[in-house]
């Protein structure tokens, strides 16, 4: 299922880039997805009266990285419009996984949701850690 979704997302992104030269790069999409996921984590932590500081810092880091990636991009206004829609859908998906993991009545589905959101957040964290270690 995830592989299908990833393939569909990449195909959709490629089609957008072919049709519109002012579409976000794969890097921008990944950074936007990470920003959205940590926004969902932040909101979930806030609702659960948990620690929000780490999620807020990561969300802000990905927002800054995205701004830096878009700094020299041509037609930033159109790209940012694409990214807003993309971030909304990614945040909604992450919120759904967090809700299922926390409140799901089917234990199997809850474990799967927790595993999926954990993998997604780990992939985001590896982006940052990889950049720090490489000095990029």
Image (cartoon, rainbow, N blue to C red):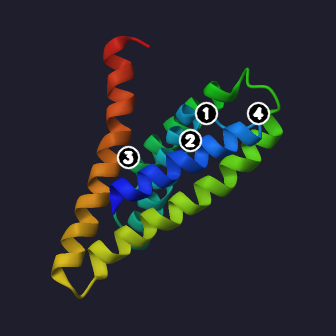
Task: Specify few, some or many for label 4: CA neighbours under 10 Å numbering under 14, 14-19, or 20 or more.
Answer: few
SS at circle 4: loop
| Residue 84 shown left or right of residue 40 in the figure | right
Please tell me which residue lies in front, 14 or 131: 14
Task: Specify few, some or many for label 3: CA neighbours under 10 Å numbering under 14, 14-19, or 20 or more.
Answer: few
Residues under numbered marks 3 and 1 in contact, where contact means CB atoms less than 8 Å apart: no
Q: CA distance from mark 2 to mark 3?
A: 22 Å
Residues under numbered marks 1 and 4 in contact, where contact means CB atoms less than 8 Å apart: no
SS at circle 3: helix
Labels 3 and 1: the sequence-earlier one: 1
Residue at 23% across, 75% down = 110
Labels 2 and 4: the sequence-earlier one: 4
Q: CA distance from mark 2 to mark 4?
A: 15 Å
Residue 86's place in the image compared with 16, above or below, is below
Which numbered tag is attached to residue 25? 1
**Which residue, given by chain and number where applicable, does mark 2 sit on?**
29
Residue 108 in the image: state x and y as whole percent.
16, 77
**Which residue, given by chain and number where applicable, does mark 4 sit on?**
21
**Which residue, given by chain and number where applicable, does mark 3 sit on?**
54
Labels 3 and 4: the sequence-earlier one: 4
Please tell me which residue lies in front, 25 or 69: 25
* Marks 3, 1: nearer the viewer: 1
| Residue 78 shown left or right of residue 87 in the figure | right
User: Can you see residue 38?
Assistant: no
Residues under numbered marks 2 and 3 in contact, where contact means CB atoms less than 8 Å apart: no
- Which image quarter is the C terminus in? top left
User: Can you see residue 131?
Assistant: yes
């Amino acid at each position: 299922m995830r592989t299908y979704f990833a393939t569909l997302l990449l195909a959709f992104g490629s089609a957008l880039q072919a049709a519109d030269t002012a579409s976000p790069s794969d890097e921008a999409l990944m950074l936007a997805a990470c920003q959205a996921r940590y926004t969902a984590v932040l909101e979930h932590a806030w609702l659960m009266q948990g620690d929000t500081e780490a999620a807020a810092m990561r969300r802000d880091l990905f927002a800054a990285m995205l701004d830096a990636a878009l700094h020299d991009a041509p037609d930033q206004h159109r790209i940012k419009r694409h990214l807003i829609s993309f971030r909304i859908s990614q945040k909604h998906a992450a919120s759904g996984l967090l809700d299922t993991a926390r409140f799901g009545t089917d234990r199997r589905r809850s474990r799967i949701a927790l595993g999926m959101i954990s993998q997604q957040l780990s992939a985001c964290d590896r982006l940052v850690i990889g950049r720090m270690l490489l000095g990029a």
